[in-house]
Image (cartoon, grey):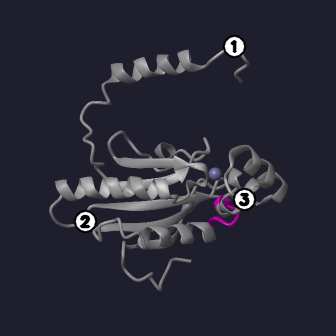
Amino acid sequence: MTNAGTTNIDELLGRNRAFAAAGRHRGPTVMPRLRAFVVACLDPRVEPAGFLGLEPGEAMVVRNAGGRVTPEVLLDLAFIGALAERQVPEGPLFEVAVVHHTDCGTGILADRGFRRGFSARTGASEEALAHEAVVEPERTVRADVETVRECSWLPGRVTVSGHVYDLDSGLVRTVVGASPVGSPAPTGSVA
Ligand SMILES: [Zn+2]
């Protein structure tokens, strides 16, 4: 643990020098090799490089509290969509995987007392904060997949799917199978 006046940054910079010496940073291009765009929680237990085995250059990853599809995430997706359209004239562009997880810390936003205090501190509306809470990850991931699917900023050559990462088992379970942005919601979602 870090105490006031001490820092772990030197430790991290030492690891960076070892990384640079190994030369694994050379080669990846800006468009991800697996054409994957992962949205996940910033929880340190929810590290996509770990549970999805991602190597440098294989996927784009956006992380925030809960792994929620916020307006900022949609803007990032639209930006990458516009870039990808320029580089890939036809065929699939990339697939978005929204990953929520069990035991998410954002669940505390479901507590009215905490929410009221945090709203007073930040100015964020209590309603918006309540909406961010991931209490039932199967439900919130379905809602966020719909938000991506209905986003008119994204090319139809982008697909989206939804998943829940179980912290106990370490396994990712698909809740909403992949389908193209702008298409009708799939009827045969994976339970
Ligand atoms: Zn979380």
**Residue at numbered disc 3:** 126
- Between circles 2 and 3, the one closer to the viewer is 3
**Residue at numbered disc 2:** 92
First in sequence, mark 2 or 3: give its number: 2
- Between circles 2 and 1, the one closer to the viewer is 1
First in sequence, mark 2 or 1: give its number: 1
| Callout count | 3
Residue 159 pos. (x, y %): 36, 68
* Quadrant assignment for the C terminus: bottom right
Amino acid beneath label 2: Pro
Q: What residue appears at the point 58 percent right and 47 percent down from the top-left corner?
A: 46
Is residue 35 visible to us here? no
Magenta stretch: residue 135 in it? yes
Residue 134 pos. (x, y %): 66, 60
Q: Residues within 10 Å of mark 1 (few under 14, many from 20)?
A: few
Q: Quadrant of residue 138?
A: bottom right
**Residue at numbered disc 1:** 5
Q: Quadrant of residue 171?
A: bottom right
Q: What residue appears at the point 34 percent right and 65 percent down from the top-left corner?
A: 154
Query: Could you say whether the residue bearing mark 3 is in a helix, strand or loop?
Result: helix
Bounds of the magenta span?
132-137
Q: What residue appears at the point 45 percent right and 73 percent down from the top-left corner?
A: 177
